[in-house]
Image: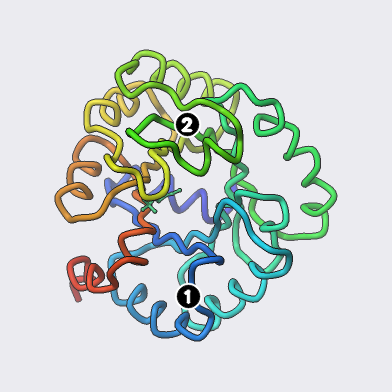
Amino acid sequence: MTSIYKKIKTSVKNNHKLFAVLIDPEKIVFSDISSFIKKVNSSIATHIFVGGSTIEENVTKKIVAEIKSHTKLPVVLFPGTINQIVDNADALLFLSLISGRNPEYLIGKHVESVSELRNTNLEVIPTGYILIENGKRTSVEKVTETKPISRSNIQKIVDTAKAGELLGMKLIYLEAGSGALEPITTDIISSVKRELKIPLIVGGGITNINQLENAYQSGADLVVIGTAFEKDELFFEQIKKIK
Ligand code: 1GP
């Protein structure tokens, strides 16, 4: 087992909740990165995720280098496109969109990315990525041309997550979509968590402390927030690290 994943497993075992700030390379202003990361460093964040739906060539590498020059937190790629796979990050969530039925996002892009991955030392973490309907059409849905699973079909969500685990995936990520109107419900989180032996990531539409606490209490091991910080960095004040 490699190190970032191993640490996630140890945290889960010790019931230590994890938190990732998601940075979309297309949305962050380069000159703002140092002050943004300062806030991340003094928050409860344990990881920085970097990724977005569409990105120009070469942007990610520059942004990852700048982030890494201001933090010791692990930088994990959460790529929406192959050109977001860069060798200067620490790990890669190798996402397979198991809620969808588009072979490109189940295995196609993965095959294409191998020639790039061969040249990196990234820790590759196979992740079952499950998109759940949240009331509006998300960019994941548009880009991947797949349908999310209905939020009321909890059994299908649970079975999809379990199938991912049985296929050997190391993490399951329940995604409501960036800027989702509603985060994943506590019912869905707890039902999935009950069945899984592997760590559970939850993200999409979480914009306040109550929603964050609810996600943790219902069984999320790692919560991802992006949009709430893009909209208002004062949110960091509410999630400061206790010294
Ligand atoms: C999106 O799950 C992440 O892929 C985070 O979503 O931007 O809504 O926080 P938000």
> Which residue type does callout 1 highlight?
Lys
Looking at the image, residue 140 lies above or below residue 29: above
Which circle, 1 or 2, is nearer the viewer?
2
**In the visual, does 7 lie left or right of 189?**
right
Q: Whole-percent x and y of residue 5? A: 51, 49
Q: Image point 29% across, 42% down: which residue?
A: 181
Q: Nearer the viewer, residue 106 or 20?
A: 106
Residue at the disc numbered 1 = 72
Q: Whole-percent x and y of residue 129? A: 51, 35
* Residue 104 found in image quarter: top right
Which mark is first along the chain, 2 or 1?
A: 1
The Cα–Cα distance between marks 1 and 2, rounded to whole angstroms, is 29 Å
Q: Image point 52% across, 40% down: which residue?
A: 140
Q: Is mark 2 on a helix, strand or loop?
A: strand
Rendered-image quadrant of the N terminus: top right
Q: How many marks?
A: 2
Disc 2: CA contacts within 10 A as few (<14), some (14-19) or many (>=20)? many
Rendered-image quadrant of the C terminus: bottom left
**In the visual, does 208 lie left or right of 102?**
left
Q: Whole-percent x and y of residue 197? A: 41, 28
> Which residue type does callout 2 highlight?
Ile
Q: Which of 118 and 59 is in front in this view?
A: 59
Q: Which mark is residue 130?
A: 2
